[in-house]
């Protein structure tokens, strides 16, 4: 089975050089450090947001499991006393 990449082949060295040249022409060499810094900050914020969402989902799942266990314990106790 021959699988094709979703976005085509990964660019190699020459393609990356052309892309870098275009970026330098568009933004200028002086703005590249600021662009890289803001990109890094955005990636950090995205990672932090993803971790927050994952933590909230985990806490919600733990809460549901805890309620299920309490419910089962209550009904098990009711059946043994009845």
Image: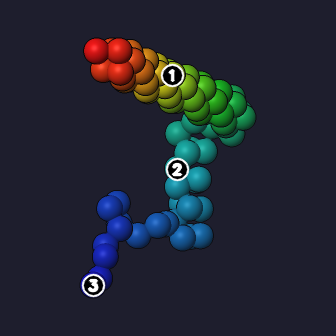
Quickly name the residue at label 1. Answer: 59
Q: CA distance from mark 3 to mark 2?
A: 37 Å
Q: Residue at x 31, y 73 (%)?
A: 4
Name the image quarter holding residue 12.
bottom right
| In this view, the mark in front (3 or 2) | 3
Q: Position of residue 36 (x, y in %)?
A: 66, 36
Is residue 49 in sight in this rendering? no
Q: CA distance from mark 3 to mark 1?
A: 41 Å
Quickly name the residue at label 3. Answer: 1
Q: In what quadrant of the picture does the C terminus appear?
A: top left
Q: Residue at x 35, y 68 (%)?
A: 5
| In this view, the mark in front (3 or 1) | 1
Please say if 82 is above or below 17: above
Please say if 39 is above or below 49: below
Q: Position of residue 10 (x, y in %)?
A: 46, 67
Q: Position of residue 53 (x, y in %)?
A: 49, 24
Dot 2 alpha-carbon crowd within 10 angstroms: few under 14, some 14 to 19, many 20 or more: few
Quickly name the residue at label 2. Answer: 22
- Give the camera-side residue of 7 and 55: 55
Determine the secondary structure under disc 2. Answer: helix
| In this view, the mark in front (2 or 1) | 1
């Amino acid at each position: 089975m021959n699988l094709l990449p979703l976005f085509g082949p990964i660019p190699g060295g020459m393609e990356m050089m052309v892309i870098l040249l275009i970026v330098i022409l568009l933004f200028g060499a002086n703005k590249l450090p600021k662009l890289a810094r803001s990109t890094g900050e955005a990636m950090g914020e995205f990672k932090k947001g993803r971790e927050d969402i994952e933590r909230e989902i985990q806490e919600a799942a733990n809460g549901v499991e805890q309620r299920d266990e309490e419910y089962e314990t209550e009904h098990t106790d009711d059946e043994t006393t009845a």
